[in-house]
Amino acid sequence: MSKWYEKSGPESDTVISTRIRLARNLHELPFPVKMNKADRKKLVQGVAEATKNCTAEYDFQFVNMEDVSKVEAVSLVERHLASPEFISECDGRGMLVTEDETVSVMLNGENHLSLQTILEGLNLQRAYQTADQLDTMLEKSLHFAFDETLGYLTQNPVDLGTGMRASLMLHLPALKDGGEISRISTSLSKLGLALRGIYGSGTEPKGAIYQLSNQVTLGLSEQEAITNLESIAMQIITQERTARQTLAQSLDIQDTVSRSLAILQSARIMTNDEFMRLISNVRFGVAAGLIENVNYDVINRLIIEAQPATLMLSSGKKLTPNERHVLRAQMVHNIVKNENKADD
Amino acid sequence: MLCESCGKNPVTTHVKTIINGELTEYSLCAECAQKLGYGNLLTGLGRNFSSLLGGFFGETEPDSTDTMRCKGCGSSFDDIARSGKVGCAECYHIFYHRLIPLIQRIHGNTKHRGKVPGGELPQPRPQSQLSLMRRELRDAIDSENFEHAAALRDRIRELEGEKANE
């Protein structure tokens, strides 16, 4: 079964994926900050019991965070299944995840449950429907903390109301190149949205990949929040496409794109930073029509599989940074080469 | 400690992230946090929470005579302000009036309009919702929470209008 990151979806030139998260807490237990070991166990058991009602829809596997290695935990973040905060403390935490990794639930993190769906491309409606359906199934046997005025009650008041965070993973190389991101980010914050880099320290996001998400959860419905996010996203996408057209005419840029593909195809040693820079150039090249024989699904897949922890996890052994750089170059070379062949 | 991005201003926001396969935390000043999409109070409220509450209630020392604790989890309001985390569902009822100004500031709103659990069950009739809101309005006026009262007043008018149009 292919995972969401092995595919591409609507508006895939700019939108890599769509994610919905719903924060939920059980009425009868204190919030995570006040939970003891027995409470955490009770929650995990309660949720395991509740998911028995939906085995026909979801093939959930349970991951006990206390049993996973550091590499596995980091790979969960690289695959966008867990937040960095979630893996920073593993006591009593767990996760349910389907085989294709599109539906998952974090247990005992910032909230008792954090329901998540993630899909390729711009897919807000479908992602919300899936999350909503899972929520409705779970609430048949779980009593979620809810107040008529404040909505779903959450540990942090920032999540009150719908408890919903909708986000889009966007590839914005041209806006980044033009130095537009911080201006956009500042004006978005006034609209209750946030735009931030996903990879790297945020001060210099790697690969020009950003996350656009809603910040306000109280006072507007899930549909209103999604419609709002989608309309702002379309404006950003339009700006990005316009900026790309100008960039793509420059011979310097065309040269950079061609060289980037050539290095990805033939390098023997590659750091993660170099990989992210090159794959971003190639993704831009595909969108601008400068490269024809590489598909978005291959690029999306590489961006996840070449991340350090995920790379190590698939190799099945602990690798030094140098060994990782060699393995990354090899993997990228094989996948890009096969892609070229398949298209011949 | 100075901001890791500009190296000039004091740190206000801490962000956990993965860099090269390692879990890392980096620290930003308010200005850089804003530029990088972590700026508003809506994300990683954490350590800003108590200063935010401080802003609401004046720069006074926490009132040591304030010993009210949540029956559900034992949290005091001071615990919530310090950690930025609410202890349990019951806390929202016990400390409702003290949390509402903060919630208003975060979301620009204090009334849920989204999904209601058990959506297939009959919803409370608008009439009963109205009487609840009128009671809440009286409470808000009594406790001199005029901002909340004004919002409630508008919502009540809206609902009354809807009723009249039926």
Image: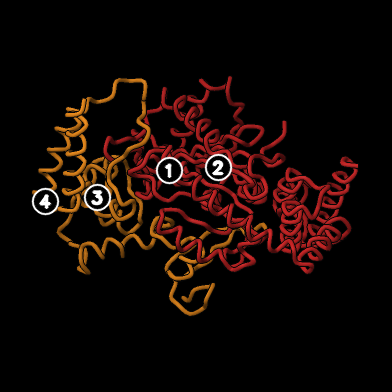
Chain colours: A red, B orange
Measured as percent of width and height from the top left, residue A332 is found at 82, 52
Cα distance in 3D space between marks 4 and 1: 32 Å
Tell me: A65 left or right of A191. right
Point out the frontmost of discs 2 and 1: 1
Question: Mark 3: few, some, or many residues within 10 Å (few <14, many ≥20)?
Answer: some
- The residue where tag 4 is placed is B143
> To which chain does the residue with label 2 belong?
A
Give the labeled residue for mark 2: A19
The local secondary structure at tag 3 comes to helix
Chain letter for mark 3: B
| Image quadrant where one finds the C terminus of chain A | top right
Q: Is residue A149 above or below residue A14?
A: above
Question: Which is more N-terminal, label 1 or label 2?
Answer: 2
Q: CA distance from mark 3 to mark 4?
A: 12 Å
Q: Identify the disc placed on residue A225.
A: 1
| Residue depth check, mark 4 versus mark 2: number of the one nearer the observer | 2
Q: Are marks 3 and 2 on the same chain?
A: no
Residue type pointed to by label 2: Arg
Label located before the other in sequence (3 or 4): 3
Left or right position of B161 against B92: left
Q: Position of residue B99 (x, y in %)?
A: 25, 51
Q: Amino acid at mark 4?
A: Ser
Please give the name of the residue rendered at 45% of the width and 77% of the height, measured from the top-left corner: B9
Q: Which residue is mark 3?
A: B100
Label 4 sits on a secondary structure element that is loop
Q: Residues within 10 Å of mark 4 (few under 14, many from 20)?
A: few
- Contact? badges 4 and 1 (CB < 8 Å): no
